[in-house]
Image: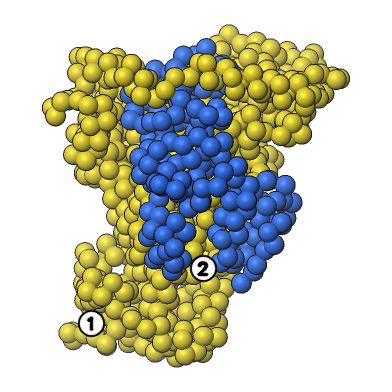
Chain colours: A blue, B yellow
Amino acid sequence: MPEYSKERIESLIDGTIPFDDAKDMMSAYKDSDRFDKYREILQERAAWDDTILLPLTDHLYVVNNGNDRVTKCDCGHEFGDYRDNWKHEALINVRDSRQDLQEIYPKAMHSDPEWMVLREYFCPGCKTQLEVEAVPPGYPIVFDFRPYIDDFYEDWLGRKAPDKQ
Amino acid sequence: MPPQQDQLNDRVRTEQERINEKIGTNEGIGWNGESVREMLETAENQYEETGHCYGIEELQLKNETPIEYEKIFSQLRGGLVNARETALNISASPIVKEIGELSFMLYTPEGDSVALSTGIIVHVHTTSDAIKWMIRHDYEDNPGIEPGDIFCNNDPHIGDVHNTDVQTIVPVFWEGELIAWAAGVTHEVDIGASSPGGDPVGPTSRYDDGFDIPAMKIGENDRLNADYEKRAEMGVRTPELWKLDERCRLAGCHMVRDAVHSLIEEEGVDTYKQFVREVIEDGRRDFKQRIKELTVPGRYQAPTFTDVPLEGEQGLPKRSANNDMMHAPLEVEIESDGSFELDFDGSDAQGEHVFNCTPSALQGAIWVLLTQTIIPNDKINDGAYYATETSAPDGAWCNPDTVRAATADAWHFLRPSLSGMIRSLSRSFNARGYVEEMASSYGDTANYFQGEGTDMFGQPFATLNFELSSQGFGARGFTDGFDAAYAMWNPEADLGEVEVWELLEPALYLGRTLKPNSAGMGKYRGGSAFESVRMAWGTDELYLQNNGNALAFNSPGMFGGYPSSTGYIHNVRDTDMEERIENRDKYPVRDGTPEDSQMFDLVEGEDRQFEERGTSLLEEYDERDLYLSVNRGGAGLGDPLERSVELIEEDLNEEHVQQKYAERVYGTHVKEVGDGEYEVDPEKTASKRDRIREQRGEEAIPVDEWLEQRREDVVEGNFIPVVKKTYNESLELSDEWDDHFRSFWDLPADFTFEMED
């Protein structure tokens, strides 16, 4: 079973890893301590002290803020209970005209906005573009990922989640 | 003894004699005198009662003799790969011989897959469906299952993705018992459908789909029946390629049969029997274990859509000449016991078009993707099938409630619909820290050169150009996607040589190049697509179709990355190419983008076809007319404002992105420093990015406010008919999705969209 240094995992997170090294990691058996090292790195890098329970995206985490388990951006903005879709607490911009779509795509290389629009979701804190949905107008907001945190820790990792230890 | 039996090897002849001895007795061809149907029913009951394949609680062979266990697997796998690598040389079809679009598989007597070769691993389970269908329909009694028999299937309603994937299936006997099935699949260039090719756009019902072989016995004594061969020869547009592909599959199956016989001679039949069952239970456990190792339990949503813009299309019946849109509302549920469920609840209805797919086809597409994500290293067989669940409403595009539904181009919906599974898995890989496994999605396969006519030798021809198996791949978690090198649904990853395609198709390549702005933008961009400009040459008659998404994005990004671009149609007829060639004037070797297009600038034509849609039926081309294959890029990952200036400079200088889009979307300050050479100013870029972030804050609005504004559009139905039609179909087919949609928008219980006549 391989083990990788913290530096190697950091280079993967930062996108500075040489492709051949990443390819070796893809071809090998998985390192079982990855999650712990990864979480440790992310926790060290966080600008706040709340306990990271699980990364959701490259900017969003489920954390325990001392009172509740919430979705939190690395800028510190909180989106509320992680079991609710964080997008409802985000800012949104909808590209629903040819003019708006042609800021991103050349003519004829984008959707017909009557068939499909782009919805951009931003963090109200740092204004990072967190997700882009490509859906027909009128489509309900998509809840991308609702993790089962305690099942993950207790049934798969064999221990309580960090905020329950 | 009939003369043809002289061609049988001793083993098969001996087995025929043993089976003949059973005639008139009550003994079946299964193990211990059972019929195969009894064996299948027993296995199904054992799984239902114990949750283990064949009721196996303990992997005795694996635990007690692990090295022998691995050796047996390697021998079987080696036999299958050897069969593939040898047999493909019998074929003359470039799809099979150049691209490698074939595979061989080994099954238990009950039809569960034990192991498979490399190649189109789509068929790990589809052929299993076909074998089980034959067993359930009592083929043991009629038409009989005997040593030397050859069966063939290409019917997706029985077990296949689409009928152009043709399966040859050969029973393998040992001492009077059916011990295994060997099977091989190739993808055909043409299937004799109402329009040409291997992914025809023209069919509107099963009866247009082409040559149908619904699990038939097509040969005995290791020889193909002459009447079947004649029927096939007259049933497809490419009879010579068909015949060689058929021999390729049959030769490979016989090699697999020989490998099984050799293994049994070496290890003994009891060990073989124990192994093939244990290895499937092992595969089931392995899959669940891999789910627990790589993912996070939870619920993942990842809908995808594809447009079918056929309203008013000439040559289609009235019921089919309509716009349609695929809705694939994929939800993935991973439970703490490692179970993996794919739910297509909320899908829209089957259509009067050729893009429907059967549950067997859905399994095929799921497996080709899972073998590249969850189980790339382990023993791939039907054990993994038993570890997963898939559901879709009756009457949905992915679960038609009638065999009438056309499915010959099922891939057109399958490819995008399952990109959501890749995005969902990637979210879990990110959560676990396995960033190297992430992919935002994959580029769809379009728009490919497919048609018929006469070739430069004056002969009738039909083609499906398989350069389509190299598209832009989605952005990774740590780097950009591969450029024009990979189609995840078809992982042979080879465009084929231009010169080979030019030998088979009466059209020269004027150019095959990467296409700017085709990749989805993001912190990491998707892989760029390629495009091919073809010029009809040496032909009296050429008909080609177009097929690909254009009015809807179907490869969405993730973490703030954008979808890859859509396609379009750009073909030019009655051109001035003859004059340009004679005068040595410039001519188009690419299109570029429609805003900066060589096809517009460097060729004149009386009939220019430029359309924002991407799909059309067959259209005529004459000598020196131009046809553009616009392929697709991969989706982006991450906020584009976080892309490094070094990567953006590379993008500009290698023409992956044009300057104005790099400036607007990546927020860069770009300066041209030479002819087509660019530099990005890091400091000015940082300031510009700050301004864009401020602008986002000023222009974007809180989601709840936006929902309040937009609810009225839903209540009043302010959408075009095809959108309302799609929603209505989803609401009608699923109570659960109906509840979801109505509760989201706070609509009355009887809500549906009113449709104009």
Apparent side of residue B25 relative to residue A154 in the rendered image (left or right): left
Apparent side of residue A140 relative to residue B620 in the rendered image (left or right): left
**Residue at the image position 15 percent from the left and 25 percent from the top:** B748
Q: Which mark is residue B378?
A: 2
Both on one chain, marks 2 and 1?
Answer: yes
Q: Looking at numbered disc 2 in the image, what kind of residue is underneath it?
A: Asp
Query: Percent position (x, y) of residue B308?
Result: 38, 27
At mark 1, the secondary structure is loop
Q: Which residue is mark 1?
A: B34
Query: Percent position (x, y) of residue B718?
Result: 29, 14
Q: Looking at numbered disc 1 in the image, what kind of residue is underneath it?
A: Glu
Task: Give me the C-alpha separation between circle 2 and circle 1.
Answer: 32 Å
Q: Residues within 10 Å of mark 1 (few under 14, many from 20)?
A: some
> Is any part of residue B301 visible from this angle?
no
Q: Which mark is residue B160?
A: none
Query: Percent position (x, y) of residue B78?
Result: 57, 73
Q: Residues within 10 Å of mark 2 (few under 14, many from 20)?
A: few
